[in-house]
Amino acid sequence: MKIIFFGSTSDSVLVLKKLVGVILAVTQPPKPVGRKQILTPTPVETWAKKHHVPVSYRIPTQTADLLVSASYGEKIPMGTIRSARYGGLNIHPSLLPRWRGGDPVPWAILSGDRDIGITVVTLSEKFDQGEIIAQTKIPIANTDVSLLLRTKLFHIGADLLVDAINEKHFHGAPQDANGQPYAKRLTRDDGFEPWEKIMDPKESDRINRKFRAFHPWPGLWTLFNGKRLKILEFKKAPTVVQLEGKKPVSWQQFQKAYLPS
């Protein structure tokens, strides 16, 4: 089966390397990264070139038997989907139709969901609204952080996807998203929490979920004397913090320097 793959992140690579018959990897073009703004290719491009898979930054005109998308970040035109013999499949890290959207894992943790999952869904005209092909549910532990949980889900999803392809399972059940929450894309501002909330013991459980949900990005942060204060570790209270322009310090060191009793 000839497959065109769409993806950009390290999670995408977890899926890409499980597939057989990929004739093209479509990904985002290199972007400036870090303080030196070094032009850096996506993990998908790096892996594909290492394994001699052709790479494109544009929607292809060539046809394939199947399109596969995993953390690609852009809409694939319906004309392109229809041109493939079996259409397309996408991996989404949530229990669709719950948490459609760009960042489902952080919002599931923040909301206190007990479970999360990975869904193989058909590519459709609108994001995450295709037919559900396969789905697996796992519990959310009270120590889970978004990055590691998301990676775990994509490991599971890659196997689900391969099984669906091997069985030629390309049609499934429609979704009903009525009343289901939407996972909007995170911004840096989502990580903000007022100082008084950070310091309130009654908010501790929620702040802990927020810290885990938004780790490593956008992170949990507040304002202290007009400066940004990053919470680098949080248990029942902050344990490691970093004030804007300063090095990370323990909460005890910060208190001694800035919160004299």
Image (cartoon, rainbow, N blue to C red):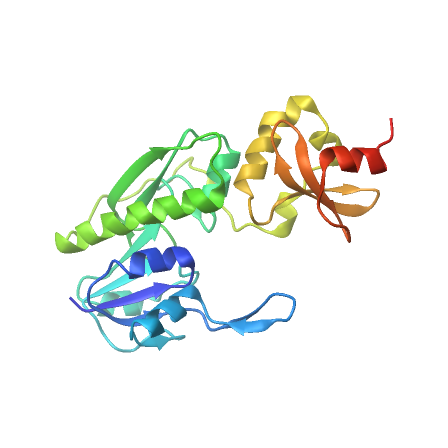
Q: Give me the residue at 30% from left, 45% from top.
A: 156
Question: What percent of the width, then of the height, locates residue 51?
Answer: 30, 71
Residue 234 or residue 77, whichever sits in front: 234
In terms of image quadrants, where is residue 113?
A: top left
Which residue is found at the position 64% from the left and 71% from the top?
36
Identify the residue at horizontal 60%, vertical 49% (top origin): 218
Q: Position of residue 81 (x, y in %)?
A: 27, 65
Residue 248, visible in the rendered structure: yes
State which quadrant residue 52 falls in.
bottom left
Locate the C terminus and report the quarter of the image it occupies: top right
Q: Is residue 126 visible?
A: no
Residue 163 image point, x, y percent: 18, 50
- Counting the numbered discs, the total is 0
Q: Is residue 61 above or below residue 145?
A: below
Write the residue at 65% across / 48% down: 189
Farthest residue in the left direction? 167
Tell whether 10 sits left or right of 192: left
